[in-house]
Image (spheres, rainbow, N blue to C red):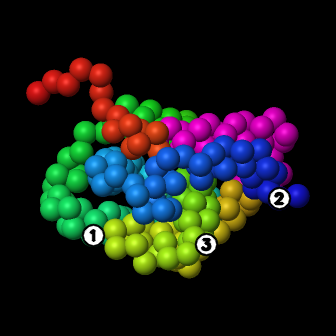
Amino acid sequence: MKFTDSVFKRVEPIWESYMKHPFIQGLGDGTLDEEKFKHWLKQDYVYLIEYARLFSIGAAKSTDLKMMTTYADLANGTLHTEMDLHRSYAKQFNISEEELEQTEPAQTTVAYTSYMLNLAQQGGIENVIAAILTCTWSYSYIGLKLAEIEGVKDHPLYGEWVNMYASEEFSTFKEDCIQLMDTVAEGKTEEELNRLEDIIVKTSYYEYMFWEMAENLETWPVPVK
Ligand SMILES: Cc1ncc(CO)c(N)n1
């Protein structure tokens, strides 16, 4: 069995819980509160800046040219294709690109990106892809599941979101990440694989917390100027 198949079995209950989360349910039935979506949008924009940085670390740590090209393409896809979705929504909400970029990351955003960046700096290429995998894969999982709902892709506000994450292009990003993970997992000891699996479980929990952050409009405890 491929490493990613056995990991999927382990994280599936966490991923199933995303589909029951009020934020995702709201995206699916179109009732999601716009303020919650805007909070997600802004937090996700600054998240994606760090995410693109992770792909770039992946490019720097690559052990061959093919791998380096894939990481560079994924960084490019994040900075252009995926972040264009966010910039397009921001425009609809009259949020400028500067405001989007200057978003103060909430505690969950800081915790999640710091966790991934710390792992990526410490180890080899296997840490980088293990840290990244859940992000792309779980959004593709959610996008494809939501796309099964009748009429969801035509929703005036949230249709664009579902169309992006259910798109062929995004499915290709996911497949590339899965393949990168399985390639570096080859020949690793059981202990090493367990360590990588733990990273994927942790990031799966962080993804849940990111939905919670958006749903609860999370900020820092005591506001300061
Ligand atoms: C928090 C988060 N995880 C994953 C993705 C998909 O790239 C995203 N945009 N945001």
Residue 173: mark: none
Cα separation, mark 2 vs mark 3, equals: 27 Å
User: Which quarter of the picture shows residue 192?
Assistant: top right
Q: Is residue 206 visible?
A: yes
* Residue plotted at (42% across, 35% down): 108
Image quarter hosting the N terminus? bottom right
The location of residue 150, given as percent across then percent down, is 55, 75
Which amino acid, mark 2? Answer: Lys
Say which of marks 1 and 2 sits in front: 1
Is residue 219 shown above or below 11?
A: above
Residue 2: mark: 2
Left-right relation of 183 to 131: right
- Local SS, label 2: loop
Left-right relation of 121 to 107: right
Q: Which residues are magenta?
A: 184-210
Which amino acid, mark 3? Answer: Glu
Say which of marks 2 and 3 sits in front: 3
Q: Which residue is mark 1?
A: 88
Cα separation, mark 1 vs mark 3, equals: 24 Å
Q: Which residue is mark 3?
A: 148
Q: Residue furthest left?
A: 225
